[in-house]
Image: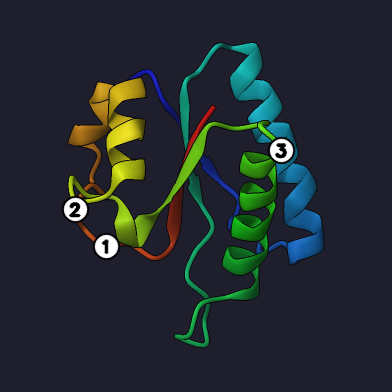
């Protein structure tokens, strides 16, 4: 597959520790001309959405607004019914075979570079 999966949940980093890891993953993907990355951040142990998920998505929203990334798709919207997901699939068609496609997984986010 031409997209990369990055597990930012591994090692249980704090949100402050995960932001530089996200930056590094984005730089690396761009350097390798990878059009899309799948970020695994988990949903949080509280069952209400974790701090890591929230902070990383805030960071991605800022990057999208600044033009540093094209789009991001929250896992719960990763289906053919989402315009953002269709943008991701246009950039990387193999995403349609991803195990989380249409699964409403709150613990992932797809990033289009």
Please give the label number shown on residue 102: 2
Q: Is residue 9 above or below residue 23?
A: below
Q: Name the quarter where the N terminus is drawn.
A: top left
Q: Give the quarter of the image for residue 110.
A: top left
Frontmost of labels 3 and 2 is: 3
Residue at the spot 46% in from the left edge and 50% down from the top edge = 109
Give the x, y percent position of residue 53: 57, 65
Q: Name the quarter where the C terminus is drawn.
A: top right
Q: Residues within 10 Å of mark 1 (few under 14, many from 20)?
A: some
Q: Residues within 10 Å of mark 3 (few under 14, many from 20)?
A: few
Please give the label number shown on residue 30: none
Residue at the spot 55% in from the left edge and 11% down from the top edge = 33
Give the x, y percent position of residue 80: 18, 45
Residue behind mark 1: 104
> Tag 3 or tag 1, which sits nearer the N-term?
3
Residue at the spot 31% in from the left edge and 57% down from the top edge = 77
Which SS class for mark 3? loop
Q: Contact (CB < 8 A) between labels 2 and 1?
A: yes
């Amino acid at each position: 597959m031409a997209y990369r999966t990055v597990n930012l949940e591994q090692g249980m980093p704090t949100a402050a520790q995960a932001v530089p890891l996200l930056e590094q993953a984005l730089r690396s993907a761009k350097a390798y001309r990878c059009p899309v990355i799948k970020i695994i951040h988990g949903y949080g142990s509280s069952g209400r959405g974790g701090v890591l998920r929230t902070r990383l998505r805030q960071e991605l929203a800022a990057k999208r607004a600044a033009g540093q990334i094209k789009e991001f798709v929250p896992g719960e919207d990763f289906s053919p019914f989402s315009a953002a997901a269709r943008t991701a699939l246009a950039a990387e068609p193999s995403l349609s075979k991803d195990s989380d496609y249409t699964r409403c997984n709150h613990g992932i986010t797809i990033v289009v570079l």
